[in-house]
Structure formats: structure tokens, C-alpha cells
Image: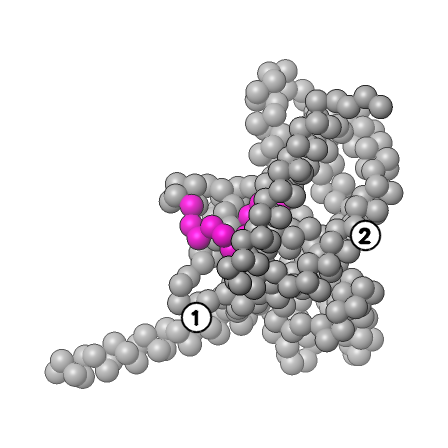
């Protein structure tokens, strides 16, 4: 079997991630940091394995669909460096869009939720894959083929950015330099993304660049006064191998079933998680507005008390 330069590069990068994971595990163990938990880690590996199997099953279809669309490319970038810079930037933006859809459309959240279901945060959390994403991810990347990027290059760019995305699943790094924090996704940014605190819900969707979040209003800085709690707002009671993948689909099915009208049934599928026809549950944006109002009222009370003391 002959290995290409791309194969060797990707293999080396994956090997690097695995070595770092083992180092993080060891440090967590000898310092009793409790960053890792045995069952949770095995669940991460299980979900990664299922995702890899589905990825392999979809690999040929993904490749040929991208290649087919490449025939209808609108333009071609001849310069090597500009080609790869534009590809990485465009792919990273389309991932931000894909990821945002996964948080704001409940049908896609039902698939993406597995990645957020861990109450721990470590490098193996990056392996806790959105199992069914390979079934629809290619449709978000079709614009790249129309932009004149080959299927192999698109897939290679995705693998490289995905590896970077794995590396930010760590608590070992507090903050990067300010300029780096402003441009790139960092562990601090991604800890926010995995938090279940109201303030942090549906924030920091980027894979490599955090600029997309800054520009489109989905950025939130990690705040020392709001300690992160990892996982979901409501954790599944059954974390068995089947339910951990399908629990949100089951909840969605039940909500659709109880919806009084066809329009409400469609809204349960397409609206953000937390939407309900009777207002019994709330979407993240509403909860965040309420939080900000509560904090504003507290600040006003404190300021009023301080003014009275000085009077």
C-alpha cells in the first residue's frame, strides 16, 4: 500500500493528538485533577467509533458528490498559497455555519447533542462525535466545490481543521496571548461552548477562527465570576450506548406528538431547542435576556445602596 503525503500528514497529526491525550490523562491522574472519568472516556471513544464507521460508509458518496459539483465550478484559483488560504478560510466559515445550524435548529441539535452530553471536558471530549453529521455535512461544503476546490483538498482541509478543533478541548491552558484569543478559537473559548450555564449557551461556534463569532454575534468570553458547568441544561438519565445517541430524537418525537397544530409540529423540528408551543420551556436567547435583566437590576440596586450610603 502506498501512502501519500496527505496520508502521512494527517496520520502524524492524529498521532500527535493521541499522544497529547495520553499526557493529559497521566497528568490528571497523578495530580488527582479528576478531569477524566472512566465511563465518560469510554463513551467518548464509543461515539467516535460509531462516527468513524458512518464516515467510512459515506466517504465514497461524499467524494463523488464533491467531485460532481466541481465540474460546475464558477472559477479557479491558480496561485497555490492563495488557493489554500481561501480554502481554509471558506471551509472554516462553512463549518461555523454548519455548527450554528446544529445549535439553532432542533432537528440538527438532536444529532449534535451527543457532542455536548459529557459533564467532563478533556481532549477525549473532542472525540465525542456528532455521530450522524457525516450524513449531511457534505451539503454544507458543496459551495467549496463550486468555488473550484477539489474533493480531496476539501476533505484534507476539513481533517486538518478538525484536528485543531480537537486540541482546544482541554482545561490545561487557561488563556492564550490576547492577540491569539482575539483571532483564533482557544481552549478558553471552547470551554464556554461546552458549558451549560445560561450565559454561555450557543456561543463560540468556530473551529479555527473565533472571528466568525465576534462578527456574527455568537461570541462570549469565559468569565471568572461565572464558573463553567459542563454538559447539558438537562442531562439524560440513561447514558447507555443507544440512548446517548437517540435521547433528543425521542424527546423531539414526544414534543411533536403533543403539539396541537401541524404548524407547531413543524416549529418543534425547525425552531431552536427549548422552544415550546405553550411557553413551558424557553430558548437560550430568552433565558440570556432574562439573565442580563436580572444582572442589570442587581447593579442598579448596588449603585442605589452606594449612593444612599454616600448621601
Q: Is residue 111 above or below residue 287?
A: above
Q: Residue at x 80, y 79 (%)?
A: 258
The numbered mark at residue 50 is 2
The disc placed on residue 292 is 1
Residue 221 place in picture, x, y as percent: 44, 56
Q: Which stretch is magenta?
A: 166-176
Q: Pick whichever, 240 or 188, lies toward us.
A: 240
Task: Indicate the quadrant where residue 36 lies.
Answer: bottom right
| Residue farthest left in this picture | 311
- 41 lies left or right of 66: left
Image x and y of residue 100, in percent: 62, 53
Q: Where, by quadrant of the figure, is residue 95 drawn?
A: top right
User: Magenta span has 168?
Assistant: yes
Left/right placement of residue 146 relative to residue 192 reads right
Is residue 79 shown above or below 287?
above
**Depth check, front residue: 97 or 15:** 15
Amino acid at each position: 500500500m502506498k501512502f501519500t503525503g496527505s496520508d502521512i500528514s494527517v496520520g502524524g497529526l492524529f498521532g500527535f493528538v493521541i499522544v497529547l491525550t495520553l499526557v493529559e490523562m497521566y497528568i490528571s491522574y497523578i495530580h488527582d485533577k479528576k478531569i477524566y472519568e472512566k465511563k465518560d472516556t469510554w463513551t467518548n471513544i464509543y461515539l467516535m467509533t460509531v462516527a468513524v464507521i458512518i464516515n467510512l460508509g459515506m466517504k465514497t458518496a461524499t467524494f463523488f458528490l464533491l467531485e460532481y459539483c466541481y465540474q460546475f465550478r464558477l472559477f479557479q484559483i491558480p496561485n497555490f498559497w492563495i488557493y489554500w488560504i481561501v480554502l481554509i478560510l471558506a471551509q472554516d466559515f462553512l463549518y461555523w455555519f454548519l455548527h450554528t445550524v446544529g445549535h439553532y435548529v432542533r432537528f440538527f441539535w438532536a444529532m449534535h447533542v451527543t457532542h455536548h452530553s459529557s459533564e467532563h471536558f478533556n481532549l477525549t471530549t473532542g472525540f465525542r462525535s456528532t455521530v450522524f453529521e457525516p450524513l449531511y455535512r457534505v451539503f454544507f461544503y458543496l459551495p467549496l466545490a463550486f468555488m473550484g476546490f477539489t474533493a480531496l483538498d476539501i476533505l484534507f482541509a476539513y481533517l486538518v481543521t478538525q484536528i485543531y478543533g480537537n486540541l482546544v478541548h482541554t482545561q490545561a491552558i487557561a488563556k492564550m496571548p490576547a492577540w491569539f484569543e482575539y483571532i483564533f478559537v482557544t481552549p478558553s473559548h471552547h470551554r464556554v461552548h461546552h458549558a451549560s450555564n445560561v450565559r454561555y449557551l450557543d456561543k463560540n461556534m468556530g473551529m479555527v477562527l473565533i472571528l466568525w463569532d465576534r462578527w456574527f454575534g455568537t461570541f462570549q468570553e469565559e468569565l471568572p465570576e461565572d464558573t463553567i458547568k459542563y454538559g447539558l441544561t438537562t442531562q439524560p438519565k440513561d447514558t447507555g450506548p443507544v440512548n446517548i445517541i437517540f435521547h433528543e430524537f425521542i424527546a423531539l418525537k414526544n414534543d411533536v406528538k403533543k403539539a396541537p397544530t401541524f404548524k407547531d409540529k413543524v416549529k418543534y423540528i425547525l425552531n431552536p431547542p427549548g422552544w415550546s408551543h405553550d411557553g413551558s420551556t424557553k430558548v437560550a436567547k430568552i433565558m440570556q435576556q432574562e439573565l442580563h435583566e436580572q444582572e442589570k437590576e442587581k447593579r442598579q440596586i448596588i449603585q442605589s445602596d452606594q449612593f444612599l450610603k454616600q448621601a
